[in-house]
């Protein structure tokens, strides 16, 4: 078999791998009958309005919150110069290292009725009853999501403002515009497409969340999917809810792509305006204090306080921690993360190489499909994998395929690849963009074949991109909760699953150890990202 034919075969298999979960969810509507119609009517009369209004209200609140926090912090570190600005440029990325459900556990442990804060207040001031309102509600979930997801807006808005804002603000200053006008009418409108793209990404993460919504008892589409599948044992209802959630995500993805195109259009039109020596506006006094407060609050709420809250139970009784089981949980997480990272990088390299060599319609289509996986919620992927498995089990009960998907790591790695393939693909494509096409022409003139070109020319130049892609996929797999919760093999609990189960059982002190381990792992890509932003 030639390399070209093997490449086409692998591309076809990859397309099937990615499309099957989504196709299974959408194809569930082909089984429409009177029973399915009755189930849909029952959901429309009972749970569907609650899922819709709760998810919609949560998205509106989170979208407004991340837009304000992300835009304010990006404008502060980009447009102004104040004490601590260099520190906040990278510190504002730290909440990316903390999964949202870990932040929810930390705040609940500290602020609940029996937590240390309310207990101390009652003992010190003679108070009775609850001092603070319950955090486990939509408002509490909104606060958690805002201070863990605002970096999406911060990153994109900071990039948009850094490209042109300081030069155009300098030009506006020379024309006599005051500082307030320069910020509101010159700088902030430049970042609107970036803010829209960041908000869309944050909302996709909000809709895909299971840990926070489940722990806080919020009835969103994701928790409804799990309830329909596990509690009601109704696969048709789970598939229909998954389709509804998928449609909402497609709309958000279209909005994000449109905003990204507007960002490129704006940058292309702008060129290099104003003075090349334009610098951020220096601040002093109250203005500098306000800028420091704007940047300190997100870092404090999204990273510092959750980490301190989780360290408290660990430092109180270090010897009682389940270190032996922790090593087992960590080993399972590392094993699944390592396998998924290696496979994702290998497949992403094949896709990027195929796109570079030919770029035909089939290759472009498969690459686009792989790029959409990150937007698909883990709950939808789980339903999409289990639907065909259930059909196969009913049709051919003796086939070993069902066991390999549900009883081994194959099914969960499959879900990880569908979910996180786009992360590796973007890194490999950026690596290929830095390799001149003349290298390929020179190698072909010297008689180098396709496989030798990939192994001897491209791979040495792509090692750093491959390492970055593997790291990002590894960390995402370590933090993934919904898919892991249902598809993990028996006796293969991961750090994310154990943290969720311990928190659900109100053993928040024990949940601190695996939660902190996830935070430490999450710091690795944050450090990598902050170094990339600082480099020229």
Image (tube, rainbow, N blue to C red):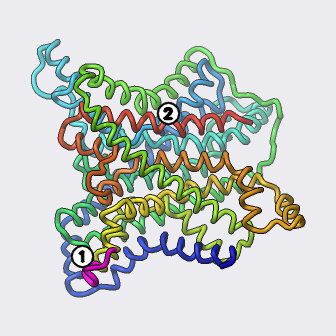
In this figure, which residue is indicated by the disc labeled 1? 40
Q: Against 431, is 277 above or below? A: above
Q: Residue at x 46, y 37 (%)?
A: 521
Quadrant of the image containing the N terminus: bottom right
Of callouts 1 and 2, which one flags the residue occurring earlier in the amino acid sequence?
A: 1
Please tell me whether the stretch drawn in magenta is mainly helix, strand or loop. Answer: loop
Q: Position of residue 201 (x, y in %)?
A: 50, 52
Q: Residue at x 67, y 57 (%)?
A: 429
In this figure, which residue is indicated by the disc labeled 2? 94
Q: Secondary structure at mark 1?
A: helix
The magenta stretch spans which residues?
393-400
Q: Secondary structure at mark 2?
A: helix
Q: Against 447, is 191 above or below? A: above
Outermost residue, top side:
124
The one of 171 and 47 positioned closer to us in this rendering: 47
Q: Is residue 466 left or right of residue 101?
A: right
Q: Residue at x 32, y 28 (%)?
A: 310
Q: Quadrant of residue 247?
A: bottom left
Q: Residue at x 56, y 77 (%)?
A: 12
Q: Position of residue 170 (x, y in %)?
A: 76, 32
Q: Against 254, is 69 above or below? A: above
Q: Which of the labelled discs sits on residue 215, or is there none?
A: none
């Amino acid at each position: 078999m030639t390399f070209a034919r093997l490449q086409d075969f692998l591309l076809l298999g990859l397309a099937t791998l990615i499309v099957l979960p989504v196709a299974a969810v959408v194809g569930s509507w082909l089984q429409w009958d009177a029973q399915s119609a009755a189930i849909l009517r029952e959901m429309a009369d009972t749970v569907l309005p609650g899922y819709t209004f709760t998810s919609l209200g949560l998205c509106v609140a989170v979208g407004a919150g991340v837009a304000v926090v992300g835009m304010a912090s990006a404008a502060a570190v980009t447009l102004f110069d104040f004490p601590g600005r260099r520190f906040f440029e990278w510190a504002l990325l730290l909440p990316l290292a903390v999964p949202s459900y870990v932040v929810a556990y930390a705040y609940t442990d500290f602020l609940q009725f029996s937590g240390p804060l309310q207990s101390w207040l009652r003992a010190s001031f003679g108070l009775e009853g609850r001092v603070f309102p319950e955090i486990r509600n939509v408002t509490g979930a909104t606060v958690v999501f805002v201070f863990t997801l605002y970096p999406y807006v911060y990153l994109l808005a900071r990039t948009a403002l850094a490209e042109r804002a300081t030069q155009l603000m300098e030009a506006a200053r020379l024309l006599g515009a005051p500082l307030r006008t320069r910020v509101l009418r010159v700088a902030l409108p430049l970042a609107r497409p970036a803010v829209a793209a960041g908000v869309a990404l944050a909302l996709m993460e909000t809709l895909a969340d299971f840990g926070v919504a489940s722990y806080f008892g919020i009835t969103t589409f994701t928790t409804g999917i799990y309830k329909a599948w596990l509690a009601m044992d109704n696969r048709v209802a789970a598939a229909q809810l998954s389709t509804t959630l998928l449609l909402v995500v497609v709309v958000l993805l279209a909005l994000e792509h449109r905003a990204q195109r507007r960002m490129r259009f704006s940058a292309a039109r702008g060129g290099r305006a104003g003075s090349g020596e334009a610098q951020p506006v220096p601040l002093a006094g109250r203005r500098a204090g306000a800028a420091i407060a704007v940047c300190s609050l997100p870092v404090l709420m999204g990273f510092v306080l959750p980490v301190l809250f989780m360290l408290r139970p660990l430092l109180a009784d270090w010897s009682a921690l389940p270190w032996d089981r922790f090593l087992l949980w960590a080993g399972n997480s590392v094993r699944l993360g390592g396998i998924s990272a290696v496979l994702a990088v290998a497949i992403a390299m094949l896709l990027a190489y195929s796109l570079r060599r030919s770029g035909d319609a089939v290759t472009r289509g498969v690459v686009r499909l792989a790029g959409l996986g990150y937007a698909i919620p883990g709950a939808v992927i789980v339903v999409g994998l289990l639907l065909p498995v259930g059909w196969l089990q009913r049709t051919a009960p003796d086939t070993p395929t069902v066991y390999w998907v549900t009883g081994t790591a194959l099914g969960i790695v499959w879900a990880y690849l569908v979910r996180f393939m786009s992360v590796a693909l973007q890194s490999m494509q950026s690596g290929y963009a830095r390799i001149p096409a003349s290298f390929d022409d020179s190698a072909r003139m010297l008689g180098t074949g396709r496989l030798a070109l990939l192994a001897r020319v491209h791979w040495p130049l792509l090692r750093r991109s491959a390492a970055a892609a593997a790291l990002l996929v590894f960390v995402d797999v370590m933090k993934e909760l919904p898919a892991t919760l249902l598809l993990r093999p028996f006796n293969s609990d991961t750090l994310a699953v154990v943290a969720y189960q311990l928190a659900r059982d109100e053993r928040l002190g024990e949940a601190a150890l695996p939660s902190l381990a996830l935070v430490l792992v999450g710091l690795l890509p944050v450090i990598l990202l902050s170094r990339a932003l600082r480099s020229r």
